[in-house]
Image (spheres, rainbow, N blue to C red):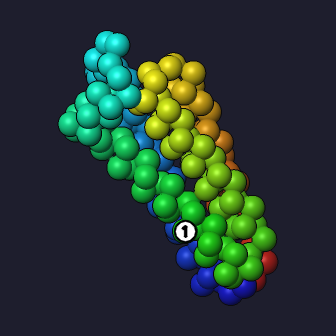
Amino acid sequence: MSKNHNQALRNHSISMVVLLVALYIIGTVVGLYVEFPEAGSAADNWKFAMQNGLVLSHIVVGTLVVVGTIGLYVRALVLKDKNWKIAGGLAAGFSLLAWVSGEEFVTGQSDTYTVAMAVFFILALVALGWGIYQSKDQVAAKK
């Protein structure tokens, strides 16, 4: 793989880290300042989520992370880069699991899913960080 391809995948990964940091900040604000209605049905919870700007922004940025990490993984598969296939695949999987946990949280309001979102978020961040760290070696080796 060329140095340019490695740099492109690295930049893609860095942009996902930036989105994850934004997602973390928005999620923290949501956790501190937003309360879902008591004893609402799943439909009521989703209606509230779609009408609350903070929750909706958390959903949108989370969806961008899922799409972006899947894109990173697909690019790595096409370019046949082992490092980014591993990092991108793990990041995509963990991001998708966090996204599904968020969907389950909105539907049922169980704190278990909040914890799951946080754990999968951290694992996605670690996977991307590992990919970025490993890609430095690839750049250095090609010099």
**Disc 1 crowd, CA 10 A, few/some/many (<14, 14-19, 20+):** some
Question: At 54% from the left edge and 27% from the top edge, which residue is drawn?
Answer: 113
Position above or below: 51 against 125: above
Q: Is residue 118 visible?
A: no
Give the image quarter of residue 42: top left
Residue 123 against residue 132 in the figure, above or below: above
Q: Which residue is mark 1?
A: 71
In the visual, does 52 lie left or right of 55? left
User: Nearest the camera: 2 or 28?
Assistant: 28
Residue pictured at 63% horizontal, 47% vertical:
94
Where residue 14 sits: x, y (%)? 52, 60
Residue 124 in the image: x percent, y percent?
Answer: 62, 47
Query: Is residue 36 or residue 121 the one in the foreground?
Result: 36
Residue 41 appears left or right of 103: left
Residue flagged by tag 1: what amino acid is it? Gly
When the figure is inspected, residue 68 is found, relative to residue 102, above or below; the finding is below
| Count of labels in the image | 1
Q: Quadrant of the C terminus?
A: bottom right
* Residue 78 visible, this angle: yes
